Image: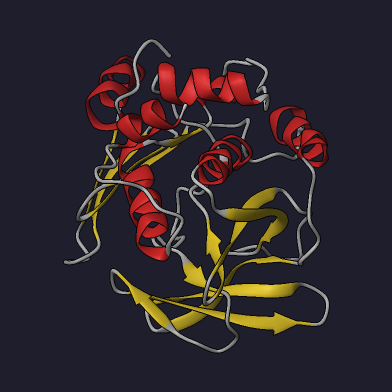
Amino acid sequence: MVERYLERIGFEGVPKPDLATLAGLQYRHFLSVPYENLDILKNIPISLEPDDLFDKIVKRKRGGYCFELNALFERLLCELGFKTVSYFARFLLNEPKIPMRRHRVVRVELENGFYLADVGVGSVTPECPLKITEGEETEIRGLGYMFSKDDCLGWVLNVKVDGEWKRLYSFSEEKQLEIDFAQPNFYCQYSPDSVFNKTNMVALRTQTGKYTLDGNIFKTIDWKTGAIEARECENDEIPGILKYYFGLEAI
């Protein structure tokens, strides 16, 4: 399992349960495994069984969303000797009110503290592990990140966008079992209120930014220069875009 997973994400070297390895794994994951909801749109049930996730993401070189990507990533970390815990999170960015818990994150324990590791979001989440420490700002590729505490929400991960701090998501420190993610996974697939079953949501980080496909809008984003190229695609163009930019075939 480990060797094929490391090959899938292009990780080189000898992995160890330390911060350098964790950072390398997380970054390579973002560059190699797309965030995507294509099975949900085709009404293909999302299985969270480890063997099914490994088959989809590693063997068939697909992507997924948080309940898939962070579940398999945590399994890899455990195989490599990391101490991990999964938490539920509330995605807060641009939400008019506090939403339900529908995001999965991974906490990793290292010698010098606890770190957040999250490979399950296609937006402005950090590409590197973040130490869970209140009030400490970290800059990654021009974006600032900082944890704060909230009496109701628990830990809140904030992101600085265009000089303004915004709440990205929050999580409380209650360990979740794998079965706990079955219900929100079902909700995200089938609820009429879910954002995941409406239109294409595909993203893949690059060394300079990321590619995204939102509906029929394909974007190339350069975080260093701030340049964004966007165009509307015809339906018959999308399979080619998925293959060329995201490495996704036979969807």
The front one of 227 and 170 is: 170
Q: Residue furthest bottom?
A: 135
Q: Position of residue 68 (x, y in %)?
A: 59, 34
Residue 14 versus residue 150 in the image, above or below = above
Find residue 119 and report its horizontal and vertical position in percent. Answer: 48, 49
Residue shown at 45%/85% (left/top)?
137
For residue 35, above or below residue 227: above
Query: Seen in the image, is 135 located left or right of residue 170?
Result: left
Image quadrant containing the C terminus: top left
Q: Position of residue 11 (x, y in %)?
A: 29, 42
Question: Residue at (45%, 54%) from the top-left corner?
Answer: 123
For this rendering, which residue is in front, 1 or 39? 1
Most extreme residue toward the left is: 225
Residue 76: x %, y % from top left: 51, 39
- Identify the residue at image location x=61%, y=56%: 83
Residue 12 drawn above or below residue 139: above
Q: Quadrant of residue 19?
A: bottom left
